[in-house]
Amino acid sequence: MDIVAHALRTVAAVTVAVGASASTLMAQCAMCKSSVETTDNSAFVFALRDGIYLMLVTPYLIAAAIAVGVYLRWRKRTRQGRAAATVKLPHPRLN
């Protein structure tokens, strides 16, 4: 349960940090829109679109990395617990 609580605290901290900068991010959207409308350079438009895709995918990659880390730590701890709980019984003697 400790790992899950730590992961939730981390996700909450990242969410608060992103939410705090939301007004700055929204201001950038209007500036990008105006620069795309005034520019006829298609290379600029493609680069801007690729940047938007990168910003869109990044939170999902962070969440996936956290989930994989939590899963791997959980699996490691359950395997260690299982190994400690396993009792090896002696083979029965054949008379």
Image: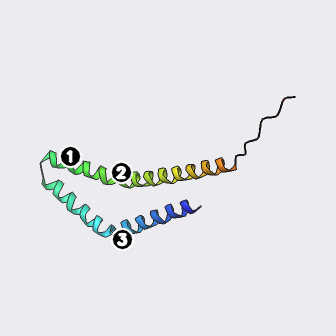
Q: Quadrant of the N terminus?
A: bottom right
Judged left or right of residue 13, residue 94 is right
**Mark 3 or mark 2, which has the lower sequence index?**
3
Q: Which residue type does callout 3 highlight? A: Ala
Closer to viewer: mark 3 or mark 1: 3
Q: What x and y, as percent, mark residue 60?
A: 40, 52
Query: In front: 80, or 70?
Result: 80
Q: Which residue position is annotated with label 2?
A: 57
* Residue at x-position 15% and y-position 45%: 43
Per the image, label 3 sits on a secondary structure element best described as helix
The earlier-in-sequence mark between 1 and 2 is: 1
Q: Which mark is residue 46?
A: 1
Q: CA distance from mark 3 to mark 1?
A: 29 Å
Instruction: Classify mark 2: helix, strand or loop.
Output: helix
Residue at left offset 40%, top offset 54%: 62
Circle 1 sits in a helix, a strand or a loop, which is it?
helix
Sort mark 1 into few (<14), some (14-19) or many (20+) by Cα contacts within 10 Å: few
Residue depth check, mark 1 versus mark 2: number of the one nearer the observer: 2
Check if mark 3's residue and mark 1's residue have beta carbons within 8 Å.
no
Name the residue type under label 2.
Answer: Val
Q: Residues within 10 Å of mark 3 (few under 14, many from 20)?
A: few
- The image position of residue 40, as x and y in percent, is 12, 49
Q: Is residue 53 above or below residue 22?
A: above
Mark sitting on residue 20: 3
Amino acid at circle 1? Phe
Q: Nearer the viewer, residue 48 or 62?
A: 62
Q: Position of residue 54 (x, y in %)?
A: 30, 51
The residue most toward the top is 95
